Amino acid sequence: MPDVQALVNEFLLKLKKRKIEGSQATAKQTAELLRSVISQQRVPYANQAGALIDAVRAVGEQLIAANPVELAVGNIVRRVLHIIREENLSLAADAIGGLNLSAASDDEDDTEQDDHPVLSAAAVAAAARSTLRPPSLHALLEDTLDSAAVPHTSSSGAADKSSRGRKLKHDVIEAVNELIREISTCHEQIAEQAVEHIHQNEVILTLGRSRTVMKFLCAAKEKKRSFRVFVAEGAPRYQGHVLAKELVARGLQTTIITDSAVFAMISRVNMVIVGAHAVMANGGVIAPVGMNMVALAAQRHAVPFVVVAGSHKLCPLYPHNPEVLLNELKSPSDLLDFGEFSDCLDFGSGTGSPLLHVVNPTFDYVPPKLVSLFITDTGGHNPSYMYRLIADYYSAVDLVLKFIFICNFALSIDQCLATRSIT
């Protein structure tokens, strides 16, 4: 097995040097690295989930610090943490249900009940309340189960915990494998919806180059849709030129326009379809620079502004959050040749400080009010619904609801046992 720390260091170097292109590749490699961390992590008898969470969090903090602008890294780290908590709670719920069901179904075998005491509703309720206090969503639950459900002196109890630890790791790794498959197929899942949104003889506008947009448009072409694409070139890197060549190679009628011509051409457009770097919790979009100008032009002319993005780009942070860096400054050489730049230095002052400054931002922020529709691998969603979709991937609300059900179940069993003991 490869050394995990060596894998982490290698991936950190790639992130720092910006060697990985695209959020999908970054997200997939992050998930694969965390899977290796989990598979080689040795878990103790007590608080197995806590050990996995600590290991993933320690690696995740390093990855996020290496390239804070690549929000897909933090998204995947949070997704994996959520998976660990969810799988641990699922095993705990099964254990609680099994203990209570065995106690309620057989009232003659008192010796078995002594070996496996019933977990009281109060203990379960305390564990449920503990989930509301971050960050130990399951550590307190683990402690509660260890103290209330399983005798520490029992050798069978230690074996059960060891078996449960192996089961937890297995379930978490399987869930991470499913996450990797989801990331790998997100483009295809989004492209399948193209025929529902692109109609005959429409004119589509996009900016720069997005693999998701390219596959989306090509999927509509394969369904015999006839439409035309305007591609804003996406200065200063001119990624729109690359997209235009790809579309033409697939038989799509394509027109390249300058970024400054978007307002002039938007009145001829039926729909704007663009990709995203990240989708924030409020429905706002971090996208390549120039996208806010396109969104404003679309709003001015009542043209639908559609964002296609995989679920790995859904970020639980808000744009005003200090953890979120909305921009990264690229090299001035994208705009100005170094030879030309040297001519603008003020050598007369003696310091050689430049009179000309070059600012080359990478991203724009598009507020949710300018977005008409999000298309993800789970379907189309309004901007106002994105917070709920993001909560499904990162929030503990659904876990707390499960715990409420367990509390009610345990309480009903306690009541049943109390009534039976009185009679």
Image (tube, rainbow, N blue to C red):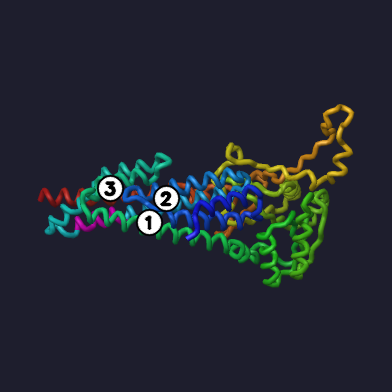
The amino acid pointed to by label 3 is Asp
Q: Read off the residue under disc 3.
A: 146
Q: Are marks 1 and 2 in contact (CB under 8 Å)?
A: yes
Q: Nearer the viewer, residue 326 or 307?
A: 326
Q: Secondary structure at mark 2?
A: helix
Q: Read off the residue under disc 2.
A: 52
The amino acid pointed to by label 2 is Leu
Q: Give the number of the mark in front: 3 or 2.
A: 2
Q: Secondary structure at mark 1?
A: helix
Gap between marks 3 and 2, in whole Å?
A: 17 Å
- Confirm whether the magenta stretch covers residue 32: no
For marks 1 and 3, the one nearer the N-term is 3
The amino acid pointed to by label 1 is Leu
Q: Nearer the viewer, residue 244 or 52?
A: 52
Q: Answer with left or right where residue 328 lies relative to residue 165.
A: right
Gap between marks 1 and 2, in whole Å?
A: 10 Å
Q: Residues within 10 Å of mark 3 (few under 14, many from 20)?
A: some
